[in-house]
């Protein structure tokens, strides 16, 4: 099983995402922002970082990179796509996911071990969790406040597209404590916390994040 | 319209050339405004055999400045080399004098690390000052051929409650985070210290650690006549020109470009591209010499590269890509625009070089070539504007034996010991003191600051703040890793600069050993007041002597660092603050020792001897605003023995947790070890010792450790064998809601209450 990890100029957690893919038992494939194809991978991860410096809105430039054209087409055909942090922002800018991510309400960057609840364990990225499972995942962002209009938020709740929510303190002012959302089909997911930094108890917050990567492998294997 | 006016200004500008200097030898020059002394100007005329051109004057004035030439500190810094033994040199692959020192950590790996200051810019413009401080040290590390893998930021501010601290601190912290986070560098440690002496002069120091293979070491030298000189990265602008504007403005009329701020503006995204691009260039093996453009910009890079290599270089300055076409050559030479590098490349590799740069969207321009003439010649549109021996710019600046004298007031200061201060006697009094100290600015929870830094990126962070040392994994297979800690108690240095510097060294050394790593090298950032003040110069002389002797006693070399003088407001100097960074190596990061208690029923041991040493302590400072007396006694032999115990115990997996004792003494160490994972402790203070002294003394060479019952005999044998005093002082409790720090016969503090006191201070001070 091959999982592509895109490197944009300014991507930072691409190496970590590739490591997580390996630990989950898949083969990581490096994808470059200038490529207009995905090299036949079975799923794609858009990693965290500051693509193109994020001097405009986060993800606003990455959205127009050649590789994102291929990602959008493949996602619409059902390819599993996970956007982490900056990747989540890019997915929103690309309109693969609804809503937007704005500056943290504290107006400060925040890095902490965050408790979350997995609300939907039936997406391709969360099937190895149980619904309502509480996990601890590293969170680190400056612009992680999830916003959408009320109608959209109600629809997301109704359709089970709110995949994960913050527990304890809401670290960035996200509406309805949203930490992650999926598209209607459930193959595209955006997550503000960093599961790739919760796969090795030695160098992160435990191993609770590994499930996102093993979930997609299980789902892909089941459909092969 | 704008373009037209710039062209007009350029046309009006009179360019001072070497031939003009020869024709007009007595022209008045603004050397004094540029900070040169009369004898320095005379010396430079003698070197050149004529008056300097304005470009030459600009180059010499910046390169001979205190910041670049170390002219006041050089004679003292020599001790670091003079006191180095062969054993200390064993691991040293590159020593002082290069961009950063490089040490061998085994398995073919090497580590380069250095700490630098960016104090004054951070006071003027906190965000950009701090951000570009990080950027500068990262490029130094990159220039050695290394991938930067971690940063640490020792920070010092005025009183927490001061208005200006509320201006400076949030900006500095956001700048450190904004730049470092965007580079993808984990921030794994540092310090946040408050003292009134830093009110008008915060200290913003930045340490970077880089990793490389032995065969990847690169040096700053330009060798091989005909090799090409390439400048790559950001374009050159008018930022950070500072004093040189004085000179440049002489040739401008009123319509010339406005004076730029002398604080540089950082672009971390460009730096991230520069890092990845440069590492790919290294991997390709096409860089024969490299230097970052930091302080003094092109003047520094060209003169240092040339003087360290074959000795000659020819530069066509008009080929430097500019952000502002109206810049004068003097300004281009002095510009401190960020995110630029200079590389020396063989002609046949230039095409491959520019190809790799294009992959990363990095601009690269050939601006000159290496020669064997022994001269640094710089041309501007066909005219020679600089023709100098490069060594005279880079290394042969003035050297001063600044007068120094122990101030008469030092005796009075040392006589005013903390013994006269009222001490709490009752359990309730001790309890209140502990809570006040835990909530005091210097000892309180710093996560308001450190949560703004990414400590996880790169996925190799094994320990990060608030741990005693930051630890990063170097090799995923073997578990090889490095540990780094920075420390300095400026109050101790003020009371006794010689001992104080050694105490800073001892604390950083102890912190590294506490994590389980073996200390192997030192970097220092020597922050002091004005070298023209004999009392300050005495502090500096004593501190460097203390540090050099301390390093020899501990057997670890100083590999590089930085001196920052003129840290003062008016006549009042800051507390002398020689920040010491110690690097350690750990063969397997899986055996690292964390500071927090995390299992119930483990025995808590106090290692080392406690004496009545409260002068200069956090207690005297925070509760009484007192500074006087003598600092704790230095005992480097005891610290060495303690380190051996801590490292051996880690290697044999005998200790579950360990925490060094420093600011706030045993009390604060217990607070931090309990709160880290919410595990309580029942403590019986050692008999025969006054409870106040036991809790709050800051005697050196001490640590607390938690040991599981089955390892106890082997652990105490280890202590006995090394002659380290050890006393069991308690046992860890559970982590339930009732968990408390319970000091038998004295007081009990529920951890909920303790945490509330400890963690409220900074959020309250910086509430929106």
Image (spheres, coloured by chain):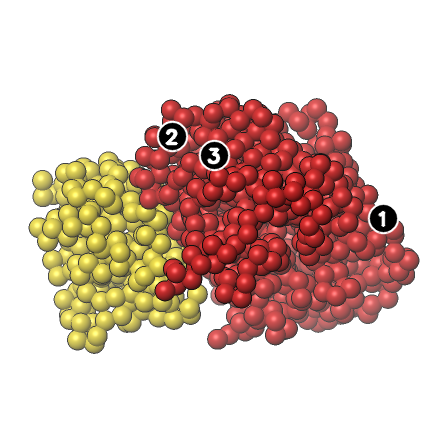
- Residue beneath disc 1: B403
Of B362 and B22, the residue lying toward us: B22
- Residue beneath disc 2: B350
Q: Chain letter for red?
A: B
- Residue beneath disc 3: B368
The spot of residue B547 in percent (x, y) is 74, 42
Question: Of callouts 2 and 1, which one flags the residue occurring earlier in the amino acid sequence?
Answer: 2
C-alpha span from label 2 to label 1: 50 Å
Crowdedness near tag 3: few (<14), some (14–19) or many (≥20) residues, C-alpha within 10 Å: many
The spot of residue A87 in percent (x, y) is 27, 54
The residue that appears at 82% across and 43% down in the rendered structure is B401
Q: On residue A196, which mark appears? A: none
Marked residue chain, label 3: B
Query: Are labels 1 and 3 assigned to the same chain?
Result: yes
The residue that appears at 36% across and 64% down in the rendered structure is B1
Labels 2, 1: front one: 2
The spot of residue B604 in percent (x, y) is 63, 49
């Amino acid at each position: 099983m091959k999982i592509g990890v895109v490197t944009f100029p300014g991507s930072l957690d691409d190496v970590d995402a590739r490591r997580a893919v390996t630990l989950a038992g898949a083969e990581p494939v490096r994808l470059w922002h200038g490529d207009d194809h995905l090299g036949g991978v079975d799923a794609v991860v858009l990693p965290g970082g500051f693509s193109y410096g994020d001097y405009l809105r986060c993800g606003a430039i990455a959205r127009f990179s050649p590789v994102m054209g291929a990602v959008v087409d493949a996602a619409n055909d059902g390819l599993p796509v996970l956007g982490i942090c900056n990747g989540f922002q890019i997915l929103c800018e690309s309109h693969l996911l609804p809503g937007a991510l704005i500056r943290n309400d504290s107006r400060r960057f925040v890095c902490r071990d965050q408790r979350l609840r997995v609300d939907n364990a039936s997406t391709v990225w969360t099937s190895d969790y149980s619904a309502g499972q509480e996990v601890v995942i590293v969170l680190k962002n400056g612009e992680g406040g999830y916003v959408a209009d009320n109608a959209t938020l109600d629809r997301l709740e109704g359709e089970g597209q709110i995949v994960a929510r913050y527990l304890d303190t809401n670290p960035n002012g996200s509406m309805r404590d949203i930490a992650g959302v999926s598209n209607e089909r459930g193959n595209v997911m955006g997550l503000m916390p960093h599961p790739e930094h919760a796969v090795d108890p030695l160098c992160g917050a435990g191993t609770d994040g590994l499930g996102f990567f093993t979930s997609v492998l299980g789902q892909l294997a089941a459909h092969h | 319209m704008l373009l037209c006016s710039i062209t007009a200004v350029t046309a009006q500008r009179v360019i001072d050339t070497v031939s003009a200097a020869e024709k007009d030898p007595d022209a008045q020059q603004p050397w004094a405004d540029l900070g040169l002394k009369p004898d320095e100007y005379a010396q430079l005329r003698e070197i050149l055999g004529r008056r300097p051109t304005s470009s030459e004057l600009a180059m010499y004035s910046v390169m001979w400045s205190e910041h670049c030439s170390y002219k006041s500190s050089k004679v003292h810094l020599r001790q670091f080399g003079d006191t180095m033994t062969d054993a200390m040199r064993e691991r040293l692959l590159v020593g002082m004098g290069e961009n950063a020192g490089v040490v061998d950590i085994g398995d073919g790996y090497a580590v380069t690390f250095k700490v630098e200051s960016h104090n004054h810019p951070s006071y003027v413009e906190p965000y950009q000052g701090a951000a570009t401080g990080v950027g500068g040290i990262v490029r130094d590390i990159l220039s050695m051929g290394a991938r930067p893998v971690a940063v640490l930021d020792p920070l010092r501010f005025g009183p927490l409650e001061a208005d200006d601290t509320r201006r400076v601190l949030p900006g500095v912290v956001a700048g450190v985070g904004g730049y470092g986070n965007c580079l993808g560098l984990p921030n794994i440690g540092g310090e946040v210290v408050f003292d009134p002496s830093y009110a008008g002069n915060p200290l913003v120091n930045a340490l970077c650690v880089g990793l490389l293979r032995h065969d990847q070491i690169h040096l700053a030298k330009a060798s091989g006549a005909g090799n090409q000189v390439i400048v790559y990265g950001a374009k050159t602008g008018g930022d950070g020109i500072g004093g040189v504007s004085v000179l440049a403005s002489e040739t401008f009329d009123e319509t010339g470009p406005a004076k730029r701020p002398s604080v540089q503006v950082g672009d971390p995204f460009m730096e991230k591209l520069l890092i990845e691009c440069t590492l790919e260039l290294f991997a390709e093996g096409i860089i024969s010499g490299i230097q970052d453009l930091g302080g003094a910009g092109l003047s520094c890079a060209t003169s240092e590269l040339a003087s360290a290599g074959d000795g000659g270089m020819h530069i066509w300055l008009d080929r430097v890509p500019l952000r502002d076409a109206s810049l004068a050559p003097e300004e281009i030479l002095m510009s401190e625009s960020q995110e630029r590098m200079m590389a020396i490349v063989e002609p046949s590799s230039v095409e491959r070089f520019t190809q790799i740069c294009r992959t990363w969207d990095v601009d690269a321009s050939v601006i000159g070539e290496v020669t064997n003439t022994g001269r640094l010649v710089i041309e501007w549109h066909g005219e020679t504007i600089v023709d100098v021996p490069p060594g005279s710019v880079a290394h042969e600046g003035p050297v001063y034996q600044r007068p120094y004298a122990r101030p008469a007031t030092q005796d009075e200061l040392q006589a005013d010991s903390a013994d006269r201060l009222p001490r709490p006697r009752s359990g309730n009094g001790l309890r209140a003191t502990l809570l006040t100290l835990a909530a005091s600015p210097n000892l309180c929870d710093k996560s308001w600051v450190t949560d703004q830094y990414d400590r996880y990126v790169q996925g190799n962070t094994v320990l990060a703040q608030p741990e005693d040392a930051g630890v990063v994994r170097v090799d995923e297979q073997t578990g090889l890793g490095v540990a780094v800690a920075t420390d300095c108690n400026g109050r101790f240095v003020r009371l006794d600069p010689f001992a104080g510097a050694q105490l800073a060294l001892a604390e950083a050394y102890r912190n590294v050993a506490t994590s389980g790593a073996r200390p192997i090298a030192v970097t220092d950032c020597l922050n002091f007041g004005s070298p023209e003040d004999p009392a300050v110069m005495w502090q500096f002389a004593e501190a460097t002597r203390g540090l050099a002797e301390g390093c020899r006693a501990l057997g670890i070399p100083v590999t590089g660092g930085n001196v920052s003088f003129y840290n003062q407001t008016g006549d009042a100097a800051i507390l002398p603050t020689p920040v010491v960074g110690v690097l350690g190596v750990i063969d397997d990061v899986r055996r690292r020792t964390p500071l927090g208690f995390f299992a119930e029923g483990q025995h808590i041991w106090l290692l080392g001897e406690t004496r009545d040493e409260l002068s200069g302590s956090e207690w005297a400072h925070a509760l009484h605003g007192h500074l006087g007396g003598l600092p704790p006694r230095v005992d480097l032999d005891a610290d060495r023995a303690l380190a051996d115990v801590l490292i051996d115990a880690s290697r044999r997996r005998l200790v579950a947790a360990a925490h060094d004792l420093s600011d706030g003494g045993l009390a604060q160490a217990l607070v931090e070890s309990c709160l880290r994972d919410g595990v309580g402790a029942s403590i019986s203070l050692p008999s025969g010792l006054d409870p106040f002294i036991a809790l709050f003394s800051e005697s050196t060479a001490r640590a607390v450790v938690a040991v599981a019952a089955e390892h106890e005999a082997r652990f105490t044998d280890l202590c006995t064998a090394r002659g380290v005093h050890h006393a069991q002082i308690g046992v860890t409790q559970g982590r339930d809601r009732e968990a408390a720090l319970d000091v038998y016969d004295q007081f009990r503090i529920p951890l909920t209450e303790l945490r509330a006191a400890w963690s409220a201070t900074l959020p309250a001070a910086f509430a929106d």
